[in-house]
Every structure is written in structure tokens, then in C-alpha cells.
Image: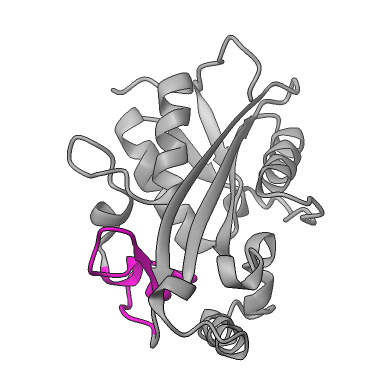
Amino acid sequence: MSTHPHRRIAGRLIIATHNAGKLREMHDLLAPYGIDAVAAGALGLPEPEETGTSFRDNARIKAVSAAAAAGLAAFADDSGLAVDALGGEPGIHSARWAGPDRDFAHAMAEVQRRLEASGARSPGQRKAHFVSALCVAWPDGHLEEFEGRVDGVLVFPPRGEKGFGYDPIFLPDGFDRTFGEMTGEEKHGLPPLGRGLSHRARAFLKLAEACLERR
């Protein structure tokens, strides 16, 4: 858990991601709080090598690297899909399964291939969850860390063109549409308008309670 007391986020904040889909979601989440957010790519910051063994490790690596390079607070996410029948894979390697071209159609096909090879064909055998670990790092070394999770099942063929990554195959529990079929507001909109449904929104709600004030 993060060190107490929690530190409030004020002034400029780097969003330490080079993933356009994540950047869009993180901008959406921060918007109600009036935070002056800037993308790491816009500042020319390099992408650090993600050498951690957990989502939390990798979020911390990205946030600390950006904060140190720019001398500003930095906000990073590490997230991925964990499939029960595949022993939690792709997990922290979720982006890696898409290859250097970030071809998630290929990655989703690989998940399907491995599920079928393992004999996991019914919805009950295709349980999965998304995890998001968020880290805010300051140049002085202070960290705030939060984690969120959403459970569901995988469906094939992929459904929907919205979202990004593995969203088109992920059907969250209690819903009849995949993340790929949901609007951004439906997927990660925050209360009172949205449900804070996604893993990233759930982690962000914890972060907001600790570190942000609504404008």
C-alpha cells in the first residue's frame, strides 16, 4: 500500500504512457479534476524497459522513470488480461503478445488458439479478468499506488470496434456487451454519470479519493 498520509496531485502531471488508447482513457479519467496532464511522448521522454514481475512493478518503473526525467509528478498504468485457463497469461505480457506492431487481432487469436488447445471451450472455462495497477511518482521519490480489477469471460469471435487491446473479447460479468462494444463513458465513466466499470476506472477511483479533488 502507499505511504500515508496520501499526497495530493497538484500542478502539471505527466501521463507516462506511449499507448494512444491508454492515453485517451487516462485523459478522460483526469478531466473532471482539472489536472494539467501532458503525455510522456509529447515531452520526448523515452519508454523504459518494463522488467518488473507484476503489474505494480511495471507501473512504478514507468512513473518513476518519467518523474525523474522531467522533474514533474508522473502517472503510469500497467494493465493486462489474465486468463484463468492459461494460468494467468498473458498477464504482464499482454502487450508483448501483440508483438512490436501492437497487433491485438493477432494477440486475441493467440488467446483463442491456446484456450482451444487446452480444451477450454465453454464460457465457464473461459473466465478472465483485467487488472490495472496505477502509480503516481514524484521527483522526490514519493509514490502513491492503487490497483483495480474487473472479472468476466472471453468471447469469440471478437465483438466491437471501440476500446483497444483485448477489449473486443472481454465480456464483463453482468453485461451482455464486450468492452469493445461499449462507449468510453460506459466502460470507464466515473460516478455519478458512469459506473466506474473498467479495471482502470476502479483503480482510478481509489487514486482520486486519495490524491485528487474535483473541480
Q: Residue at x 82, y 54 (%)?
A: 51
Q: Quadrant of residue 34?
A: top left
Q: Is residue 115 left or right of residue 170?
A: right
Residue that sits furthest to the top in the current view: 5
The picture places residue 99, in percent across and down from the top left corner, at: 68, 79
Tell me if residue 45 is in the magenta stretch. Answer: no
From what the image shows, is residue 95 above or below residue 145?
A: below
Magenta stretch, overall SS: loop
Tell me: residue 61, above or below residue 113: above
Identified at 68% across, 59% down, the residue is: 92
Q: Residue at x 53, y 48 (%)?
A: 132
Magenta span of residues: 158-181
Give the quarter of the figure containing the C terminus. Answer: top left
Does any portion of residue 87 appear in the rendered image? yes
Left or right of 180 on screen, residue 191 = left
Seen at 41% across and 41% down, the residue is 202
Q: Is residue 26 visible?
A: no
Name the residue furthest left.
193
Q: Position of residue 56 (x, y in %)?
A: 67, 42
Report the front residue among 183 and 110. 110
Q: Nearer the viewer, residue 146 or 137?
A: 146
Where residue 167 sits: x, y (%)?
Answer: 41, 69
Residue 214 position by quadrant: top left
**Is 56 left, or right, of 130 in this rendering?**
right
Q: Position of residue 130 (x, y in %)?
A: 50, 57
